[in-house]
Image (spheres, grey):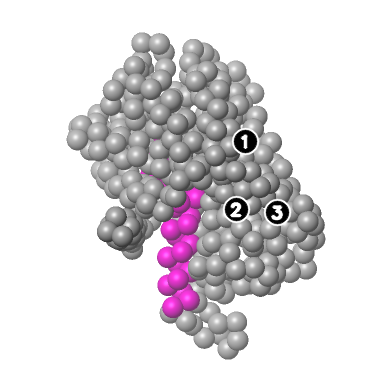
Amino acid sequence: MINYRYTVRRKIMLERVASYIWGTGLLVLLLGTGLCLSFRLRFFQFWGWKTILRRTFGSLRTKSGKGGTSLTQFQTFSTALAAAMGTGNILGVAAALCLGGAGAIFWMWVSALLGMALTYSENVLALRYARTLPDGTKTGGPMAYLRFGLHSPVLAVFYSLCCIGASLGMGNMTQSSAISTLAAEAFSLPPLWTGIGVTLLLGIILLRGTRSTGKVIQWLMPVLSAVYLLAALGVIFRNAAALPAAFGQIFREAFGLHAVGGGISGAVLQRAVQTGLRHGVFSNEAGLGSSALVHAGGSSEDAQLQGMWSMVEVALDTLVCCTLTALAVLTSGAMTQADNAGSIISAAFSGVFGQAAPELMAGITALFAFCTLIGWCCCGEQAVRYLGGEAWRLPYRVLFCLAAGVGAVVSLRSVWALSDIANGLMAVPNLLGLLLLGKQIGTQREK
């Protein structure tokens, strides 16, 4: 009984700490930094898309000049996208609608637009201060510009430790837990068998090296994303008549307006803003530095190009994927048919896919979660290599695979809280670095 009470108190304490870290202060810091950097970039994320698309997808026609163990440009893009896109783009959106109403989607858009300035700046600085290892592989990320830009090894080590914690928590155990839960509900698979399967499959991919990881992600992410987006579009087109009402609900509730009478509700407004901004940050991870960790290990040395690729990642993650999920839910009327995220998603897609919807969505969501596992392994690996060198790369990958197996079979309430804490603590030194080195970002863009 004493141990049980201690466990409950520990979980409650961790959740309170996580809630405090991810409170209004950090969200204001994230968005304030994003706004400051947007001014530095002259709001490039709003008017520069012709240039962005030409420089990014247009550059894929040109073969990379570097080989070795580095990721190609498209592999880097796919891996960074995999780290960001996951269960949050499907179940997380449904949860945001439950907690913050349709207006939360508008504030997710706001977080994405400002987040593009953050992630662009992260990648420009990560490439500017990246270091090349003897085997030709680049290592960098926020640790590099915290140490060599701010000249603060302490902040760099602190960020690296938090990154490793987040990679094993949110990027690993929580994802394998989601896979296990979905497999049990949709296919009646025991968690133990799911855990063994995830561990073995992850080990086969990760232990073969960076190139193997990149090859898996570069075909899996585009195919998986296309399948899901087509499925969501199918639901939206089937309920196209409800689209105007869905957009009206999003904009109306975003500012706390009542559907009847046009009055303003402060409670509705506050809930929509907080839920939308928080879920937006969790979805696209702008401000955490995860995209910069992946791009720093790629083959390209063009800092502006990597920054533009990261903008595309945020746009696809939040402005496209999350928006289509929200519209599929709102136009289908699924919010009135179920009361939890998983059931809402199944209800939304059942109008097109019938009784196969739960299994289909479980399979797609589980594959997204598996891609997130691979993407976050690359993020954590950069931090491990910064702290301990190349020798710790293989032990970390082995530990990462084992942690995925554990996550599939254990209760993760405390792990979720610890992951939230690690994520929040990652953001603080990273945002300080972006603010203090912001002048270099503007100069870099003008060159």
Q: Over which residues does the magenta segment extend?
A: 267-296
Q: Is residue 62 above or below residue 118?
A: above
Q: Is residue 283 magenta?
A: yes
Distance CA(mark 2)–CA(mark 1): 15 Å
> Quick one: quadrant of the C terminus?
top left
Q: Amino acid at mark 2?
A: Ile
Q: Amino acid at mark 3?
A: Pro
Label 2 neighbour load within 10 Å: few <14, some 14-19, many 20+: many
Q: What residue does disc 2 label? A: 90
Is residue 319 or residue 322 the one in the foreground?
322
Q: Looking at the image, do the residues carrying marks 2 and 3 touch, with CB atoms under 8 Å apart?
A: no
Q: Earlier in the sequence, mark 1 or mark 3?
A: 1
Predominant secondary structure, magenta span: helix
Look at 60% across and 23% down and name the residue there.
Answer: 215
Q: What secondary structure is found at the residue carrying circle 1? A: helix
Look at 64% across and 56% down and name the residue there.
Answer: 325
Q: What residue does disc 1 label? A: 221
Q: Amino acid at mark 1?
A: Met
Q: What secondary structure is found at the residue carrying circle 2? A: loop
Look at 27% across and 43% down and name the residue there.
Answer: 429
Q: What residue does disc 3 label? A: 358
Say whether residue 21 is left or right of residue 111.
left
Q: Position of residue 177 (x, y in %)?
A: 51, 45
Q: Position of residue 312 (x, y in %)?
A: 55, 41
Q: Is residue 422 above or below residue 109?
A: above
Distance CA(mark 1)–CA(mark 3): 21 Å
Of discs 2 and 3, which sits in the foreground? 3
Is residue 420 or residue 195 the one in the foreground?
195
Q: Is residue 247 above or below residue 215?
A: below
Q: Looking at the image, do the residues carrying marks 2 and 1 touch, with CB atoms under 8 Å apart?
A: no
Is residue 40 or residue 163 the one in the foreground?
163
Look at 48% across and 36% down and name the residue there.
Answer: 404
